[in-house]
C-alpha cells in the first residue's frame, strides 16, 4: 500500500484493524526499545558490578533530560504531520520533515556542548557519589557524543509512524536492539571496555539505524521525503512543533527532576545500593511503560488524523480502545513488580543485598501500577489531538504536582519505604484528575455530534 492510501485509511478503516496495524508494530518497537535500555543494565550489573549499576542509575535522569529535547521535536512533529495529512495539507507536512532535521541538529549540538562543560557538577547533582562518579562519567561521555544521532533517530522514527509506515519504524527499533545486544557482550567482556563499552554499543546501533532511516526518506515515492528547500526553519512550523512537543518535553524533564529527588532521598535514608535498586525499579516499570507508549503511538496518528478530519466519533473510539489495552498491560506490570519481585530483581544482578533492596522497592512502587495505563493514555490523547495545554497539565500532575510533595512528606513518616510509596500515591491522585479531564472532553465531543451509541460501540 502506498503512503497516500495508508494515510487515507486512518479515516475509513475498521477501528480494531487500524489499532492492530498501527499499535502492534509500535508495541513491538517500544518493547524492543525497553529491552534496548534493559540490556545495558543487565550486562553492566552482571559484568561490571553493583557500583557500576549505581553509576548507570545516576545517568538515568541525565539521559531523560536529553530525551526530553528529542521528544519535544519528534513527538511535536509527528503529531503535526498527522493533523496536516488529515487536512490533506501535504505541502506543509513535507516542510515539517525538513524542519525536524534542522531542529534536531541545532538542539542536539547545544545540549551536548553545555553538558560536556558541566558534566561532573550535573552528575553530582543527580546523585553521584565519589564511588559512582567514574562509572557515570565514562558512560555519559560516549552517550553525549552521540546525542545528535539519538535525537535524529527517535524523531525520524516518530515521523515514520505518523506518515503511515509503522512497520518501518518497528524495523528500525528492532534493528538497534539486535545490534546493541550483539555488541554489548563483545565490548564489555571481550574488549574489557566496561561501562564505556555499553555506551559505545548503544550509540553505534543508533548510527546504523539512522543511516537506514535517511535512506528511506530519500525515496521520493514516499508521501513525505527529504526535499530541497524544506530545511530552512519556518517560524510557524517551529512554533507548532515546539508547542505540541512541549508536553512530552515537560514530562521527560519533570521525570529527570523527580529522579534527582528520588536519588537524593534514597541516599539520605539509605546508601548507594538503594540508588542502584531504584535503577532496577525504574527499568522494570519502564519496560511496561514503553509498551503502553507503543499503544499511544498506535493511537496518535489515528486520533490526530480523525480529529483533523472532524470525525469525533472515531477519535473517541480509538481512545477507549487504547485505554482498555493499556490497563491490561499495566496489570501485567503489577504482577511482575508485586508478586514476582525477587525473580524480577535477580535478572539484573547476582548481588543478594541488592536483590533484597530492589525486591522491596518493586513491591511498594508498583502496587498501584494498574492505574498508570489509564493516566498515560489520557495525557497522550490530548497531545495527539493537539490540545497541548491539557496534555502539559496532565503530564505535570503525576510528575510534579503530586509526586514531589509525596517525596517530601512520606519519607519523614516511613523512611526509605516512604520514598517507594510516593510513586503509587501519586499514580492514584493523577488518575483521578485525568478521569475528570476525560469526562469533560467526552462532553465536548458529544456537543459536536457524537451520539451515545457511538460512545459505547468501539468496533465501528
Image (cartoon, rainbow, N blue to C red):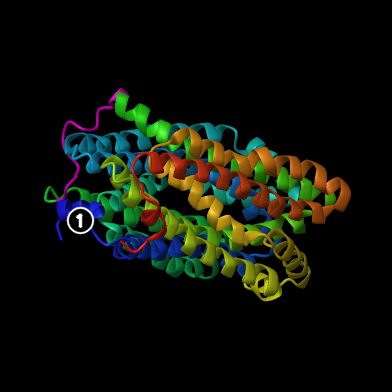
Q: How many marks?
A: 1
Specify whether residue 38 is in view. no
Crowd band around label 1 with a 10 angstrom C-alpha radius: few (<14), some (14–19), many (20+): some
Q: Quadrant of the C terminus?
A: bottom left
Q: Is residue 304 visible?
A: yes
Q: What is the residue that sits farthest to the top in this orientation?
A: 235
* Label 1 residue SS: helix
Residues 121 and 398: in front is 398
Query: Which residue sits at x=56%, y=48%?
Result: 435
Is 91 included in the stretch rendered in magenta? no
Q: Main secondary structure of the magenta part?
A: loop
Across and down, in percent, residue 98 comes to: 25, 36
- Residue at horizontal 69%, vertical 52%? 423
Q: Residue furthest left?
A: 221
| Residue segment shown in magenta | 222-235
Q: Quadrant of the N terminus?
A: bottom left
Question: Farthest residue in the right direction?
Answer: 413
Q: Which image quadrant is residue 233 in? A: top left
The picture quadrant where one finds residue 90 is top left
Q: Is residue 8 left or right of residue 298?
A: left
Q: Is residue 109 left or right of residue 407?
A: left
- Toward the viewer: 186 or 253? 253
The residue at 44%/56% (across/down) is 320
Residue tagged 1? 6
Residue 174 coordinates in the image, percent (x, y): 37, 65
Amino acid at each position: 500500500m502506498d503512503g497516500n492510501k495508508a494515510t487515507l485509511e486512518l479515516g475509513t478503516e475498521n477501528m480494531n484493524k487500524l489499532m492492530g496495524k498501527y499499535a502492534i508494530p509500535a508495541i513491538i518497537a517500544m518493547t524492543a526499545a525497553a529491552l534496548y535500555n534493559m540490556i545495558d543494565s543487565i550486562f553492566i550489573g552482571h559484568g561490571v558490578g553493583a557500583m557500576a549499576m549505581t553509576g548507570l542509575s545516576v545517568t538515568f535522569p541525565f539521559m531523560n533530560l536529553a530525551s526530553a529535547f528529542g521528544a519535544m521535536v519528534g513527538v511535536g512533529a509527528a503529531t503535526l504531520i498527522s493533523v496536516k495529512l488529515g487536512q490533506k495539507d501535504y505541502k506543509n507536512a513535507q516542510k515539517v520533515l525538513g524542519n525536524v532535521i534542522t531542529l534536531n541538529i541545532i538542539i542536539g549540538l547545544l545540549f551536548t556542548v553545555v553538558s560536556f562543560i558541566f558534566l561532573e557538577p550535573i552528575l553530582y547533582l543527580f546523585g553521584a557519589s565519589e564511588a559512582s562518579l567514574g562509572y557515570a562519567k565514562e558512560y555519559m561521555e560516549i552517550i553525549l557524543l552521540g546525542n545528535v544521532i539519538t535525537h535524529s533517530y527517535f524523531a525520524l522514527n516518530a515521523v515514520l509512524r505518523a506518515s503511515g509506515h509503522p512497520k518501518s519504524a518497528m524495523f528500525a527499533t528492532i534493528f538497534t536492539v539486535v545490534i546493541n545486544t550483539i555488541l554489548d557482550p563483545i565490548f564489555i567482556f571481550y574488549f574489557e571496555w566496561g561501562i564505556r563499552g555499553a555506551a559505545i554499543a548503544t550509540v553505534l546501533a543508533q548510527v546504523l539505524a539512522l543511516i537506514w532511516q535517511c535512506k528511506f526518506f530519500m525515496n521520493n515515492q514516499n508521501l513525505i521525503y527529504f526535499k530541497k528547500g524544506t530545511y530552512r526553519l519556518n517560524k510557524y512550523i517551529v512554533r507548532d512543533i515546539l508547542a505540541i512537543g512541549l508536553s512530552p518535553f515537560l514530562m521527560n524533564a519533570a521525570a529527570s527532576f523527580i529522579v534527582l529527588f528520588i536519588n537524593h532521598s534514597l541516599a539520605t535514608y539509605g546508601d548507594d545500593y538503594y540508588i542502584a535498586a531504584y535503577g532496577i525499579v525504574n527499568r522494570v516499570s519502564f519496560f511496561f511503560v514503553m509498551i503502553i507508549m507503543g499503544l499511544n503511538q498506535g493511537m496518535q496518528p489515528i486520533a490526530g488524523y480523525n480529529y483533523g478530519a472532524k470525525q469525533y466519533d472515531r477519535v473517541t473510539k480509538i481512545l477507549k480502545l487504547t485505554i482498555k489495552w493499556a490497563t491490561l498491560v499495566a496489570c501485567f506490570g503489577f504482577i511482575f513488580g508485586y508478586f514476582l519481585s525477587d525473580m524480577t530483581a535477580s535478572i539484573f544482578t547476582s548481588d543478594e543485598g541488592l536483590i533484597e533492596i530492589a525486591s522491596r522497592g518493586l513491591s511498594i512502587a508498583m502496587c498501584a501500577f494498574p492505574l498508570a495505563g489509564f493516566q498515560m493514555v489520557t495525557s497522550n490523547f490530548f497531545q495527539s489531538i493537539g490540545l497541548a495545554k491539557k496534555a502539559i497539565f496532565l503530564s505535570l500532575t503525576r510528575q510534579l504536582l503530586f509526586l514531589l510533595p509525596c517525596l517530601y512528606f512520606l519519607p519523614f513518616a516511613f523512611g526509605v519505604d516512604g520514598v517507594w510509596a510516593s510513586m503509587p500515591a501519586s499514580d492514584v491522585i493523577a488518575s483521578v484528575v485525568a478521569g475528570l479531564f476525560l469526562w469533560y472532553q467526552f462532553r465536548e465531543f458529544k456537543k459536536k455530534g457524537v451520539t451515545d451509541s457511538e460512545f459505547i460501540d468501539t468496533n465501528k
